Image: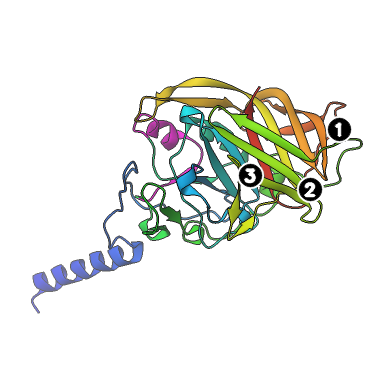
Amino acid sequence: MPAPQRARALLTYAITALVVATGCTGGPFDPEGAETTSPASARPPDEVLAVKVDNVLPARPQTGLAQADVVYAERVEAGLSRLMALYATRLPEAVGPVRSARETDLRLLRQFNEPVLAYSGSQSRLRPLIESAPLRAESPGNRPEAWYRDDARPAPHNLYLRPRRLVDGPAGREALTAAGFREGPAPAGGEPEERRTVRFPSARFAFTWSAERGGWLVETDGRPTTDGGVQLAPPTVIVQYVTVRTSGFQDRGGNNTPFSETVGTGTADLLRDGKAWKARWQRATEADGTRFTTEAGAPVNTGDGQVWVVLAER
């Protein structure tokens, strides 16, 4: 082979090898509302995975909630609710249905260092804030192999994530401890409580103590919240009272997106072991974890297992 042809052949081979090595062999997956970007680079092993989970009636029952270490319930447009599930000690095979991100998520997640945020997309005006936030944002356009649609459900309530295709493994409990979630004995005292209901304008959460399960049976809008046919029963529920204000964003229907302020100070209610405690929360800056204490100033520990945090309006 003449030298010029040999050189061209070697160059073609090198480019092909590079494409295969980097995985750039398929086109992007761009569902409605999802941005299309290039695949993420190397993945640090200590990232907490946060997944935005749909919580309206057509999205239930959800998948993968039972394995979450922390589940946040937050208010969204029209007074409805949405969940954010955090995974630090174990990863389920699938999580979903996955929906879009909100401004509240960016400030809330800063306390988990630089987590991975898995979401279905966002409105265009919010994307610059997501891209500049200290987290790794992952939507279906980034890594299409990590996502799939369930044809048995109607869109947009049918998008699911395969977490193990986004992160190499669980971050570890230390990531939760740094953010303020410390397992340990319950505080002294406490008032017996069998049931607590938290209301949003158009949504309702109820938690009923089950001594048999050792946790609080979760209901959403009057129906059991289940995963795999089993009702969720987290040992600890924290009702965190926050300021909820209007933001500069709206959904497609023109409804304003509420913003829940999780930096500052406020009151909270701790539910565990069939009791309730009045508590306080404090978070000085976005980079700080949330410190929960009793009214007397003693640190508040969580039970052994899942924690639900409901961001209720103060």
Q: Is residue 210 left or right of residue 148?
A: right
In the image, residue 80 sits, relative to residue 59, either above or below, namely above
In the image, residue 169 sits, relative to residue 186, either above or below, namely below
Image quadrant assignment for residue 109: top right
Q: Nearer the viewer, mark 1 or mark 2?
A: 2
Mark 2 lies on residue = 303
The colour scheme applied to this rendered structure is rainbow
What is the spatial separation of the Cα atoms under label 2 and label 3, in whole angstroms? 20 Å
Of the residues shown, which amino acid type is indicated by label 1?
Ala
Q: Nearer the viewer, mark 3 or mark 1?
A: 3
SS at badge 2: loop
What is the spatial separation of the Cα atoms under label 1 and label 2, in whole angstroms? 16 Å
- Whether residues under marks 1 and 2 lie with C-beta atoms below 8 angstroms apart, the answer is no
- State the count of labels: 3
Along the line of sight, the residue nearer the viewer: 131 or 306 = 306
SS at badge 1: loop
Which residue shows up at 20% across the image and 66% down it?
11
